[in-house]
Image (tube, grey):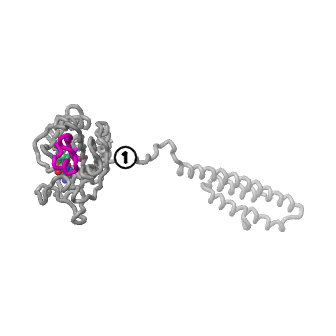
Amino acid sequence: MEQIQVLLSQARQMLAAAADSDAVTQVHRKFLGKSGELSGLLKGIGALAPDQRQPFGAAVNGAKVALEAEIEERRARLHAAEQLVQFQQERIDVTLPGQSPTAGRPHILNLTMRRIQNVLGSLGFVYQEGPELEHFRYNFDALNYPPDHPAMDEQDTFYITDDLLLRTQCTALQGRVFEGQKPPLRVFTVGRTFRNEAVDRTHNHTFHQVDAFMIDEGISMAHLKGTLGAFAREMFGSEVQVRFRPDFFPFVEPGVDYAISTPKLFGGRWVELGGAGLIHPNILEAYGIDTDRFSGFAFGLGVERIPMMAAGVDDLRHFFENDRRFLSQFA
Ligand code: FA5
């Protein structure tokens, strides 16, 4: 009987010291397993006097039942603690800010072209599209370039065949329009243009132009200057200054180059945006437009120059490299 108490108190000490459920299992094995020490006491039962056997057996079994219950309780307690540790390790802080997906946005050149469309549209010009892969005759012949004229050398480009090239200027739309439409006309296009060019800070082989023309009765340089002045103020604000200087293009007479300056940028320096002039009578006559009655103006501008001037970008190649650190600065 004393031995039962000794084993029981040994077991309780070990149980109290058990740090995890493995240790509890060991206590169970040591005292209650098949060859456990408490169960082992029953082996000596035959050596006892017959009247002592029943009370001894009952005492051993009582001790086993009690220990069993204590072991289960300890196991449950340790298991709960272990789970708590595990939960804390796996804990997710649902109040942390999430990773917001990056939203795309239109490219600054597309935004600029949309604005150009809005501004010219509000001045009564109708948008028409021309092909980037263009016939030689629309890009040059129809625009009054005499054969082998040196002005074509300024616009060398990429030829697909002798007759098919990547257009060098959006002015190529003119002949297509004159073939099918009669004045009065107010037309513009915006799109990609190409030149076999030595690439530098202000010239790329692929760039964009806006090109517009208006034909009606009594159209003069005054209408051109008024239109380009209004266009510049819409694009750059009211303090922009506009300059016209004589220039040569085979398809206009007189011809001008068109430059702007704003006090905020590039130290107020003049920057050329494009060319303009009154449509050459040779062209109007070639398409059967009565030059006694009608005259027209035309202008063509580089699109890249507009955000360069509006935001102070000093190298147009940034627009084509698609570096998001650059592009994301244009909201
Ligand atoms: C022309 O292309 C004429 N078609 C403009 C015109 C239209 C004149 C109607 C008269 C009447 P120019 O080659 O100068 O002209 O080009 C016009 C503008 O396009 C330039 O001022 C410049 O802003 C832009 N540009 C020309 N070449 C490049 C290039 N390689 N890279 C970026 N922009 C360019």
At a point 85% along the width and 58% down the height, the residue shown is 55
| Lateral position of residue 80 relative to residue 223, left or right | right
Q: Indicate the amino acid at tag 1.
A: Arg
Whether 88 is drawn above or below 229: the answer is: below
Range drawn in magenta: 278-305
Name the outermost residue toward the top.
Answer: 238
Asked whether residue 181 is drawn in magenta, I would say no
Task: Mark yes or no: residue 330 visible.
Answer: no
Give me the residue at 27% from left, 41% from top.
184
Figure quadrant of the C terminus: top left
Q: Quadrant of residue 261?
A: top left
**286 drawn magenta:** yes
Q: In the rendering, at what x and y percent does residue 244 appear?
A: 13, 39
Whether residue 152 is visible: yes
Compared with residue 148, is residue 104 higher up or lower down, i.e. above or below?
Answer: above
Residue 144 coordinates in the image, percent (x, y):
16, 53
Q: Mark 1 Cα within 10 Å, few/some/many (few <14, many 20+)? A: few
Give the side of residue 13 with respect to residue 274, left or right.
right
**Residue at numbered disc 1:** 105
Whether 225 is drawn above or below 173: the answer is above
Element assignment for label 1: loop
- Tell which of 246 and 199 is nearer to you: 246
